[in-house]
Image (cartoon, rainbow, N blue to C red):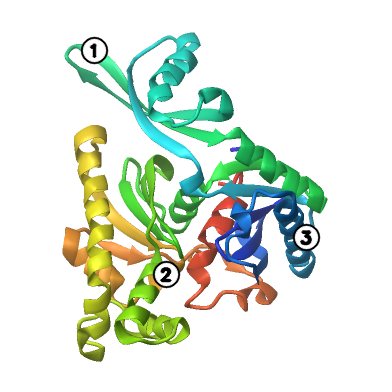
């Protein structure tokens, strides 16, 4: 457990900024501030000087409107922007681990290692052909991205305490709300607007993650194209009917099924990777989170596809929420706060 000063979680999403502040009072965790502010799509990806200035101003507006009581923050980096790998090495002396991981990582990362910050965590050990082997979860984050985030935050007048991946924040949020048993492995499907992250978690710690470039907006676009309607109406149809074969004569489910099957093939690939490379007590549960998690019938569809218990995450299931913050959370948007809530729990759990 880290002893961090009072802070809030800051998530810069695809089209919005989300802020959450959690306090621990008498061993009860309570959300005292939560705020969401829409932004221009793709603002986070704008590397220009104007983009940095605009993003800083937008964060400043959100912080002011959210009535945050501190200038300290913890921020996330999108999973699609970092390189994460599971690397298997022989058991080594502690002094040799860093060099060995960098050597193994070098051919796996498409940019020079001098340009990334590398962090790693031991996942498990096992014996193979008489040798003691260790699985390491390794994350390489581009230094340019981290520097840009630091600059954006500093320009806003905030104090940046830590930067971590969205996968780590999401796994922490799920672990707190669902208290997975010791050595219980889970697969978290985080469906965003333009990408989906697949996260393998053990005891609330990420042991594998990958990002696929398809999110819930792809469903909306194909519905709009198939039926010649605008995106706003297509979004309504998507939310109302989703993958439910019994609603709307199953037309919407049929429309989005080809894209869903592509996504599910990646999920299956991840499950097979877990079985072949990581191992454990099997994946006991699949958790659905992110803005796309509330797609009608998605939990049933995934459960039937893989025969694994599946549940849509409630990010505030085990959290108390102040009345002024509860109005921010509604059934269709609450899962878009999954990262910011996970960030706000850093050092508390």
C-alpha distance separating marks 3 and 1: 55 Å
Q: Looking at the rendering, which quadrant does residue 101 occupy?
A: top left
**Mark 3 vs mark 1: which is more N-terminal?**
3
The location of residue 347, given as percent across then percent down, is 61, 43
Work out whether residue 237 can be spotted: yes
Residue at image point 43% right, 22% down = 106
**Mark 2 vs mark 1: which is more N-terminal?**
1
Look at mark 1 in the image and give the residue it sits on: 131
Look at mark 2 in the image and give the residue it sits on: 217
Against 129, residue 179 (above or below) is below
Nearer to us: label 2 or label 1: 2
Residue at image point 50% right, 33% down = 140
The location of residue 110, given as percent across then percent down, is 44, 32
Q: Does residue 72 appear left or right of residue 257 in this picture?
A: right
Q: Dot 1, how many residues are within 10 Å of its Cα: few (below 14), some (14-19), or many (20+)? A: few
The location of residue 49, given as percent across then percent down, is 74, 49
116 and 302: which is toward the camera? 116
The location of residue 79, given as percent across then percent down, is 47, 47
Work out whether residue 2 can be spotted: no
Q: Secondary structure at mark 3?
A: helix
Q: Secondary structure at mark 1?
A: strand
Q: Secondary structure at mark 2?
A: helix
Against 134, residue 264 (above or below) is below
Look at mark 3 in the image and give the residue it sits on: 57
Nearer to us: label 3 or label 1: 3
Residue at image point 51% right, 25% down = 112
């Amino acid at each position: 457990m880290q002893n961090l000063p009072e802070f809030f979680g800051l998530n810069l999403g695809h089209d919005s900024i989300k802020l959450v502040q959690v306090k621990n009072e008498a061993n009860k965790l309570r959300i005292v501030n939560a705020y969401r502010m829409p932004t221009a799509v793709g603002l986070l990806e704008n590397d220009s000087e104007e983009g940095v200035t605009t993003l800083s101003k937008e964060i400043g507006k959100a912080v002011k409107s959210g009535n945050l009581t501190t200038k300290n923050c913890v921020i996330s980096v999108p999973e699609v922007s970092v390189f994460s790998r599971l690397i298997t090495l022989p058991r080594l002396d502690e002094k040799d681990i860093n060099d060995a991981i960098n050597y193994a990582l070098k051919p796996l990362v498409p940019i020079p290692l001098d340009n990334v910050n590398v962090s790693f965590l031991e996942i498990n050990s096992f014996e193979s052909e008489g040798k003691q082997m260790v699985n390491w979860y390794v994350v390489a984050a581009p230094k340019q991205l981290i520097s840009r985030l630091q600059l954006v935050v500093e320009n806003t007048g905030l104090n940046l305490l830590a930067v971590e991946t969205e996968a780590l924040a999401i796994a922490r949020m799920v672990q707190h709300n669902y208290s997975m048993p010791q050595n219980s492995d889970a697969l978290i499907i985080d469906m965003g607007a333009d990408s989906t992250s697949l996260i393998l978690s053990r005891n609330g710690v990420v042991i594998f993650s990958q990002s696929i470039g398809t999110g819930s907006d792809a469903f909306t676009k194909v519905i709009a194209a198939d039926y010649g309607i605008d995106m706003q109406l297509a979004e309504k149809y998507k939310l109302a009917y989703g993958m439910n074969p019994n609603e709307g004569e199953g037309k919407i489910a049929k429309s989005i099924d080809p894209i869903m099957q592509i996504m599910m093939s990646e999920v299956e690939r991840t499950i097979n990777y877990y079985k072949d490379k990581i191992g454990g007590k099997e994946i006991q549960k699949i958790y659905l989170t992110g803005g796309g998690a509330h797609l009608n019938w998605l939990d049933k569809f995934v459960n039937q596809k893989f025969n694994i218990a599946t549940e849509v995450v409630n990010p505030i299931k085990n959290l108390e929420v102040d009345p002024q913050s509860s109005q921010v959370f509604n059934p269709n948007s609450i899962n878009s706060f999954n990262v910011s809530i996970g960030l706000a729990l850093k050092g508390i759990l």
